[in-house]
Image (cartoon, rainbow, N blue to C red):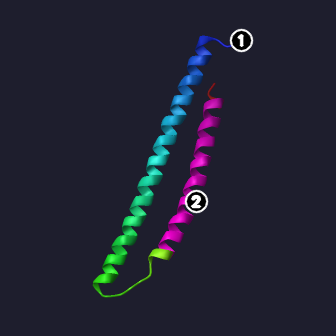
Amino acid sequence: MTTLYDLARKEQQKKFRKQFARKIAAIGIAASIAQLFLAQLVDWGLACYRIRSGIWGPWFLMEAFTSLIAVSVTIGMMRAVKEMSELNR
């Protein structure tokens, strides 16, 4: 039988997970923007010396690879939070 306390606790855990997921997503987006900005800075710096670097292709591949790693870490972090919340019951 589910008590009001159990329902309130489940609701609190759901809210905590959503907040945590939003923070992780915001950090991921900020990191992606920072990497693209750094790529643009490198491209501009090389353009000052009239060098056409062709850096955008490799940089986008690196961005895709690091985003894949970030997603897998995010999933791992969310699983760890879920397991911790289940252990603290």
**Tag 2: amino acid:** Leu
Q: Can residue 73 be found in the magenta stretch?
A: yes
Q: Quadrant of the N terminus?
A: top right
**For residue 51, which numbered disc appears in the image?**
none
Residue identified by numbered label 1: 1
Q: Give the magenta range.
A: 58-86
Q: CA distance from mark 2 to mark 1?
A: 42 Å
Name the foreground residue: 40 vs 23.
Answer: 40
Name the foreground residue: 87 vs 62.
Answer: 62
| Residue sitting at x 41%, y 54% | 30
Q: Considering the numbered disc 1 on the image, is that residue within a helix, a strand or a loop?
A: loop
**Tag 1: amino acid:** Met
Packing grade of label 2 (10 A; few <14, some 14-19, many >=20) is few
| Residue sitting at x 36%, y 75% | 42
| Relative to 84, residue 38 above or below | below
Q: Quadrant of residue 85?
A: top right
Name the foreground residue: 9 vs 26.
Answer: 26
Q: Position of residue 75 (x, y in %)?
A: 61, 47
| Residue sitting at x 38%, y 68% | 38
| Residue sitting at x 35%, y 87% | 51
Q: Quadrant of residue 64?
A: bottom right
Residue identified by numbered label 2: 68
Q: Quadrant of residue 9?
A: top right
Q: Position of residue 87 (x, y in %)?
A: 65, 30
Q: Quadrant of the C terminus?
A: top right
Q: Position of residue 54 (x, y in %)?
A: 44, 81
